[in-house]
Image (spheres, rainbow, N blue to C red):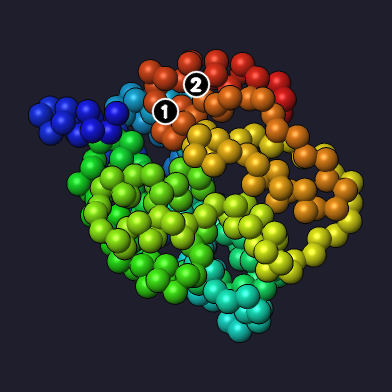
Amino acid sequence: KYEFLAHYYEKHGTPLRARLFGNIARLSRLGCAVAPLANWAQGLGISRWLLDRFLGIDRRRALPEFAGQTFEAWFARRGNGRAAAKHGQVVLFHDTFMTYNFPAIGQAAVRLLEAAGYEVVLVARECCGRPMISKGMVEQARRNARINVERLAPFADRGTPIVGCEPSCLLTFRDEYPDLLKGPEVLKVAANTFLIEEFIAQAREAGRFDARFRDGKRQILLHGHCHQKAAVGTGPSVAALRLLPGAEVSVVDSGCCGMAGSFGYEKEHYEISMAIGARRLFEAV
């Protein structure tokens, strides 16, 4: 798909909406810089009408709000509260949504990894390139991939795990990067990259995961992410969640949520995205 789109857009030009979604990291950085104003503007009916009318972003969809403090800013201001690194370092690849929209996910990941006995490290990374790839912007994605591999390769050389929370983002390292780039460095980075639940399950199996959880009966329904199910499966997620004492974990037979990146935001896809979600997932939720 992305190869076709790259050729098609090279001939016909890349639409503005595709460029916006492809460069969502840059757009989100700007949004966070003026978060109160940007979030206020997003809530206005006129803003949704304009996005719908001129960009084809369906007005019935609410775009994610921007965080007042980015995850990177929170991490930099933590001071000396980091746990002792009994089991060494782990690189947390902070994706765009974690950084600019949902920092609480990154904060929770840091606390969990530190409680497990690891020192969490961030790198000065670029967007993984997944949004660009999905919109046929292959050369921009290749540039980002090259920068990320250069900055992560020294950690991979030392055997430092690289983990992430967003499947589409992280699995780009293992799936598309070896297509976009050549050389031993990209293969080494790909082999040393794990979804956080994969890392937890493997570390626990190896006796290198010290975190302890509070008791409490919990019922947990897991909706598997499409990239996750295709490339990894939900087994590691289930194994990680079952570390919680008293947890009853079951996987929802839900298929796709219907959003599929920017697909569910696009006006021409809204109805089918809702139909996909309504097939099984909405009822389970």
Label 2 amino acid?
Ser
Observer-nearest residue: 257 or 47? 257
Residue in the image at 60% along x and 57% along y: 199
The image shows residue 48, relative to residue 103, as above or below, that is above
Q: Is residue 232 left or right of residue 13?
A: right
- Which residue bears the numbered disc 2? 273
Q: Is residue 231 left or right of 224 when viewed as pictured?
A: left
Q: Earlier in the sequence, mark 2 or mark 1?
A: 1
Q: Is residue 130 visible?
A: yes
Tell which residue pokes out farthest to the left in this image: 11
- The residue located at (68%, 68%) in the rendering is 208
Height in image: 263 above or below 63? above
Query: Label 1's element?
Result: helix
Report x, y in % for residue 128.
Answer: 37, 52
Q: Could you tell me which residue is drawn at 70 percent across and 43 percent down? A: 238
180 relative to 122 in the view: left or right: left
The residue indicated by pointer 1 is: 263
| Residue 54: quadrant of the picture | top left
Give coordinates of residue 233: x percent, y percent.
58, 38
Q: Quadrant for the C terminus, please.
A: top right
Q: Helix or strand or loop: what does disc 2 sit on? A: helix
Q: Residues within 10 Å of mark 1 (few under 14, many from 20)?
A: some
Q: Which amino acid type is marked by label 1?
A: Phe
Above or below: residue 194 compared with residue 39:
below
- Residue 30 is left or right of residue 163, and the answer is left
Whether residue 22 appears in this view of the structure is: no
Q: Can you name the residue that lies furthest to the bottom here?
A: 80
Q: Are marks 2 and 1 in contact (CB under 8 Å)?
A: yes
Determine the residue positioned at 22% across, 28% down. 4
Distance from label 2 to label 1 (Cα)? 8 Å
The x and y percentages for residue 141 are: 27, 48
